[in-house]
Image: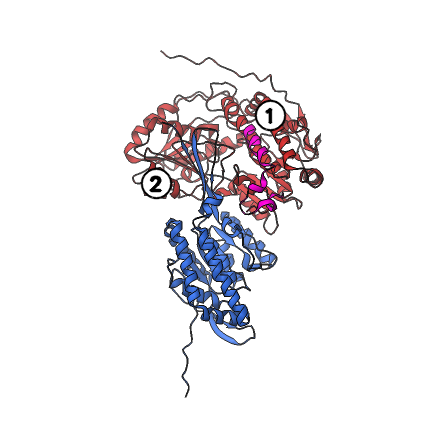
Chain colours: A blue, B red
């Protein structure tokens, strides 16, 4: 008799822990050919609110770390992804239906993207900050600071490269995130969460909910303790995007609008995904003897 | 024995206010099709002029003029040529600065010493600064290079009444430098310097349609912001209207910057140079009658020096001269409108009703016009409305703290995040506080300083986007955030 394998339970990732949805609901996840793979937790409004609390709690510590330290922590995620290549390739083949070669390439890109963003931690301030030559005897310096708690609707199609490309630019500057994964392709996000849990990323910095953006995102968009929202995960859904933008206006969240179609994640991302979620702070001080 | 000040009135003969004003569209003054309204001198309630109200159709004509000018002229003009127009405008503003200052003071109520020494010089400086960017845009946004030099198109700009011409400059100078054309709506109570600016555009031979000025109230602003052919909305004003604009542009491609309200903490530590701090507190809340979004309206003073500081502050407030804005000795001018005066009175009455201690120096207020004495409230808690709501008037709430972390906690305990002040002699504490305060501008051992090179704008519900400096270009360029 052959051995009975031990199947994995895919759970949410909130505050560094892996709870099931408080709602008790889960949903079936299939591969691209329609075969059942696993049940994923179906995150609820309450889970989203718990995730915001965890993200807010983690914000002070994470934004207070040195940029050098954040860079190393992001780089460490890349190291751990490299370490788990077979598992991630398998997850990509399953969720995106990629050939082995393409899955390898998507993983390469995802790891390289993390390394790229990790390096920005202690450089963005130098590139977008400014010493301002004011017309008076004042020291005047502008520097970017993290916006706060950012909700990210992760891309629906690119379940790992897209996910990493949406999360890394937000956290590298010191923000904390609540992510809603791809609905149909949530499992790479859970595996990514398991990597984060064994990395040096403090609990609460990244919180990952599996489930439906259409259901959960309105609660995040209107949440008064969320400072910004990235709508990339609902690309093309103008009706939902508009309603989320309207809800986001309640506390003037910074909104990264939904594109018409999911971006090509292999392209050079530029600075936009980072600069969308930083605030420029300008400090004045008199000069004199 | 006391010496009284002799009046030192600035002559208003330098300004020539017309009986009525039209809209400025496509380089010409045209009639508006709405119901014209009166703008008054808030210090005397004298009617200054009739001003046209732009209807939806008028706004549409202005947007079409701006679109034509953008497509045919302005976006195609080499940056170095656009620059020269902006330099011209800066020079004319300098040449006509006395006239602009007097007109601003008459229409707004602010003291002439402020319009003369702050508003108008900074307006000219703003045009001068952004003029120089027009042919250097490829260096402005990191990573964008030459592809980052493209303008957005037509900018719809709506500005408030507290710094009428200065807010116009903050909006128009960067927009034009980047190759956009604009339709700007000044506030209904302070349209006159914007209309004089239209004349300056004519004097500078600025191509028709590059700058259009439409006057009116909220409905005109809504028509402008909601116009389907504007590419960019820039608004300075209340958080409430800012949220309405954010909702109105949802689902569109319009780019938006919002510069909204504030409830800034001005934090004084026990080692601060107290006399300087007192000057900074007074500047922070009584400058421009407190009609300042970044006003230091919450004084957080360390408990051990609270009594001493308050004594000094009250003594200093007693020397503030409230009265005729055209008098060069005046420190605090008129409240801009009856409506704003009513709001200041209401919130102050609520402050008293909620148990805070109200104090104003003895001062004789003129019998006509809109006036409110410099006022402070002691015994204020964080729950009091006067500690939470933006009063937008000369009203200071005084709270105390014991430790730096308590000061940070209280300072950040607001939905706003526009500005903050810190007073201490300890350098490391300044930098610690500056880092911890969730505000877009932190003034340390100074307050209410502005400069064209220095980005200004808020965190949280104080809005998004920056005006001023290199950062101010992002709002008007493709590829900008």
- Magenta stretch: dominant SS? helix
Magenta span covers which residues? B123-151
- The question of residue B178 being in magenta is answered with no
Numbered tag placed on residue B407 in the rendering:
2
Out of B391 and B191, give the one closest to the viewer: B191
Whether residue B295 sits left or right of residue B62 in the image: it is left
Residue B247, x across and y down, in percent: 57, 48
- The question of residue B126 being in magenta is answered with yes
Relative to B70, is A272 above or below? below
Give neighbour class at mark 2: few <14, some 14-19, many 20+ (Cα, 10 Å).
many
Q: CA distance from mark 2 to mark 1?
A: 45 Å
Numbered tag placed on residue B91 in the rendering:
1
Q: Which residue sits furthest top? A: B1
Which chain contains the residue that carries disc 2? B
* Residue A55 can be seen, yes or no: yes
Q: Earlier in the sequence, mark 2 or mark 1?
A: 1
Relative to B105, is A242 above or below? below
């Amino acid at each position: 008799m052959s051995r009975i394998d031990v199947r994995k339970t895919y759970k949410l990732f909130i505050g560094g822990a892996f709870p099931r949805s408080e709602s008790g609901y889960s949903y079936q996840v299939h591969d691209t050919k329609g075969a059942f793979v696993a049940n994923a937790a179906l995150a609820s409004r309450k889970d989203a609110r718990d995730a915001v609390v965890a993200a807010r709690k983690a914000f002070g510590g994470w934004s207070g770390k040195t940029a050098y330290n954040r860079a190393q922590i992001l780089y460490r995620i890349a190291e751990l992804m490299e370490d788990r290549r077979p598992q991630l390739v398998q997850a990509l083949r399953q969720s995106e239906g990629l050939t082995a070669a393409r899955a390898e390439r998507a993983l390469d890109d995802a790891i390289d993207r993390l390394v790229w963003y990790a390096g920005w931690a202690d450089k963005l301030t130098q590139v977008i900050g400014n010493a301002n030559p004011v017309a008076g005897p004042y020291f005047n310096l502008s520097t970017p600071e993290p916006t706060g708690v950012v909700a990210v609707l992760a891309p629906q199609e690119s379940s790992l490269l897209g996910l990493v490309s949406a999360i890394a630019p937000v956290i590298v500057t010191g923000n904390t995130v609540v992510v809603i994964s791809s609905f149909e392709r949530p499992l790479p996000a859970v595996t990514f969460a398991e990597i984060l849990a064994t990395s040096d990323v403090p609990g609460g910095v990244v919180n990952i909910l599996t489930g439906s953006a259409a259901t959960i995102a309105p609660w995040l968009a209107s949440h008064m303790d969320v400072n910004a929202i990235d709508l990339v995960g609902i690309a093309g859904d103008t009706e939902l995007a508009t309603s989320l933008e309207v809800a986001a206006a309640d506390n003037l969240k910074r909104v990264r609008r939904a594109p018409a179609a999911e971006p090509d994640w292999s392209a050079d991302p530029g600075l936009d995904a980072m600069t969308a979620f930083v605030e420029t702070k300008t400090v004045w001080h008199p000069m004199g003897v | 024995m006391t010496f009284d000040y002799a009046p030192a009135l600035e002559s208003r003969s330098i300004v020539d206010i017309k009986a009525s004003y039209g809209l400025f569209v496509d380089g010409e003054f045209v009639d508006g099709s709405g119901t014209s309204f009166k703008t008054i001198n808030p210090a005397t309630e004298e009617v200054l002029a009739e001003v046209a109200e732009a209807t939806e159709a008028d706004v549409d004509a202005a947007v079409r003029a701006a679109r034509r000018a953008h497509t045919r002229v302005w976006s195609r003009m080499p940056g170095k040529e656009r620059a020269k127009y902006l330099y011209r405008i800066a020079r004319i503003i300098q040449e006509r600065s006395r006239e602009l200052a007097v007109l601003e003071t008459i229409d707004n109520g602010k003291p002439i010493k402020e319009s003369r020494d702050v508003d108008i010089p900074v307006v000219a400086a703003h045009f001068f600064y952004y003029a120089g960017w027009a042919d250097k845009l490829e260096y402005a946004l990191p990573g964008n290079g030459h592809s980052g030099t493209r303008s957005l198109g037509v900018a719809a700009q709506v500005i408030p009444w507290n710094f009428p011409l200065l807010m116009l400059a903050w909006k128009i100078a960067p927009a034009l430098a980047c190759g956009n054309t604009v339709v700007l709506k000044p506030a209904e109570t302070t349209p006159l310097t914007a209309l004089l600016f239209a004349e300056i555009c004519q004097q500078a031979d600025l191509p028709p349609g590059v700058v259009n000025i439409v006057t009116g109230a909220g409905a005109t602003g809504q028509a402008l912001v909601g116009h389907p052919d504007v590419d960019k909305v820039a608004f300075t004003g209340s958080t409430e209207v800012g949220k309405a604009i954010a909702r109105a542009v949802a689902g569109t491609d319009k780019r938006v910057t919002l510069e909204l309200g504030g409830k800034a903490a001005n934090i004084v530590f026990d080692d601060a140079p107290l006399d300087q701090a007192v000057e900074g507190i007074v500047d922070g809340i009584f400058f421009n009658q407190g009609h300042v979004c970044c006003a230091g309206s919450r004084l957080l003073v360390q408990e051990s020096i609270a009594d001493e500081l308050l004594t000094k502050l009250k003594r200093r407030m007693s020397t503030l001269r409230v009265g005729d804005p055209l008098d060069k000795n005046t420190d605090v001018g008129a409240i801009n409108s009856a409506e704003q005066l009513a709001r200041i009175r209401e919130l102050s009455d609520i402050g008293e009703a909620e148990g805070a201690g109200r104090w104003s120096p003895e001062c004789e207020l003129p019998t006509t016009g809109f006036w409110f004495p410099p006022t402070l409230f002691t015994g204020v808690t964080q729950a009091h409305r006067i500690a939470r709501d933006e009063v937008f008037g000369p009203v200071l709430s005084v709270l105390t703290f014991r430790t730096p972390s308590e000061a940070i906690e209280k300072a950040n305990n607001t939905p706003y995040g526009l500005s903050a002040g810190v007073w201490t002699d300890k350098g490391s504490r300044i930098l610690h506080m500056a880092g911890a305060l969730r505000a877009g501008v932190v003034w340390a051992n100074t307050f209410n300083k502005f400069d064209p090179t220095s980005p200004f704008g808020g965190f949280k519900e104080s809005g998004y986007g920056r005006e001023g400096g290199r950062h101010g270009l992002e709002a008007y360029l493709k590829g900008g955030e």
